[in-house]
Image (cartoon, rainbow, N blue to C red):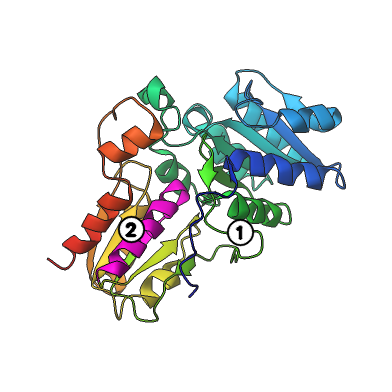
Amino acid sequence: MHKLPELNTVGNKIPNRQAICDTLMAAAADDRNVVALCSDSRGSASMTPFFNAFPQQSIEVGIAEQNLVSISAGLAKCGKKPYAFSPACFLSTRSYEQAKIDCAYSDTNVKLIGISGGVSYGALGMSHHSAQDIAAFSAIPNMRVYLPSDQHQTAKLIRALLTDQKCAYVRVGRNPVEDIYSAENCPFEMDKATVLCDTENPDAAIVACGEMVRPAIEAAKALAASGIHAAVVDMYCVKPFDTEAILKLAPTVKGYVTVEEHAPFGGLGSMVSQAVAAACPKRVVNLALPDAPVITGTSKEVFDTYGLNAEGIRQAVRSLFA
């Protein structure tokens, strides 16, 4: 268990998609098999520098998400290491069959990068929101699902994915995110959650992924000031799900609060509830987007409306003790 990090609001603040580009550019310089593909989205994916630097390792397929995935699968069968970028809202719906058959069932080394995930395209409404992608991709056998929380964890995840031969879906947001970790202190183990807490015997557990990890840590710090010590589980590896990390906390915690930028069904909350109910029945409170078209607005406005912020998480944890 690691200490809760000190959250610096003055440090670097970049989109996780930029960290992916930087990491892939470093890898592509030494490995010509690293290939980036985009569906008319290189700007949105922050991949323009990669396309400019490595034109022979870049493919633009246009607005054709199904082709994007199938071409990536073909390249993987030829020994390439394709990274396919497309808005998460389209990648998880328009090309779902190709992800299921060409990538997962065919066991191809394709990394699907869902950019502008969740409600990143807030003002564009439901057509551009991806509130079902965790559930959809997690339901595919042989598909892994990752939601890194900041640039440092994102870079470590991408470097780890470059070393294996299995398909995966990585969802990142559109906006710059404040650092949680640092280059010198970013605990990371592939497919193992990072558990953060300032005490060995926490009173409650907050399980979060992606952009929800930072407000979860802010909530934990506020709760500590009132005498409630909450562990924060950074579950960047939604699938394979780190059940062991969840159950290790069961002996001392009153209950669990899950936080996700996703619909309330089939996502992180469902997975935590299933694991806890099977092994150590305790209360689980799930904070998520509603089962309805969400309001239009900035990500912050959406999060604040539905309590997906530090105060909403703090209140949810306190409700475990009511």
Q: Residues within 10 Å of mark 1 (few under 14, many from 20)?
A: some
User: x, y (%) of residue 264?
Assistant: 29, 45
In the image, 247: left or right of 237?
Answer: left
Q: Residues within 10 Å of mark 2 (few under 14, many from 20)?
A: many
Question: Is the residue 34 above or below the residue 203 in the image?
Answer: above
Going by the numbered disc 1, the residue's amino acid type is Ser
Given residues 107 and 213, the one toward you in this image is: 213
Q: Residue at x 60, y 20 (%)?
A: 64
Q: Quadrant of the C terminus?
A: bottom left
Residue indicated by mark 1: 182
Question: Is the residue 164 above or below the residue 38 in the image?
Answer: below
Where are the magenta residues, as a range?
A: 206-226
Which is the main secondary structure of the residues drawn in magenta? helix
Where disc 2 sits, the SS reads helix
Q: Residue at x 33, y 33 (%)?
A: 301
- Within the magenta stretch, is there residue 220? yes
Q: Residue furthest left?
A: 322
Q: Residue at x 39, y 29 (%)?
A: 298
Question: Is the residue 22 above or below the residue 196 in the image?
Answer: above
| Total numbered labels placed on residues in the image | 2
Q: Residue furthest front?
A: 10
Q: Is residue 301 visible?
A: yes
Q: Which numbered disc covers residue 219?
A: 2
- Within the magenta stretch, is there residue 95? no
Which sits earlier in the primary sequence, circle 1 or circle 2?
1
Going by the numbered disc 2, the residue's amino acid type is Ala
User: x, y (%) of residue 35?
Assistant: 77, 37
User: x, y (%) of residue 133?
Assistant: 44, 39
Given residues 316 and 89, the one toward you in this image is: 316
Given residues 214 and 160, the one toward you in this image is: 214
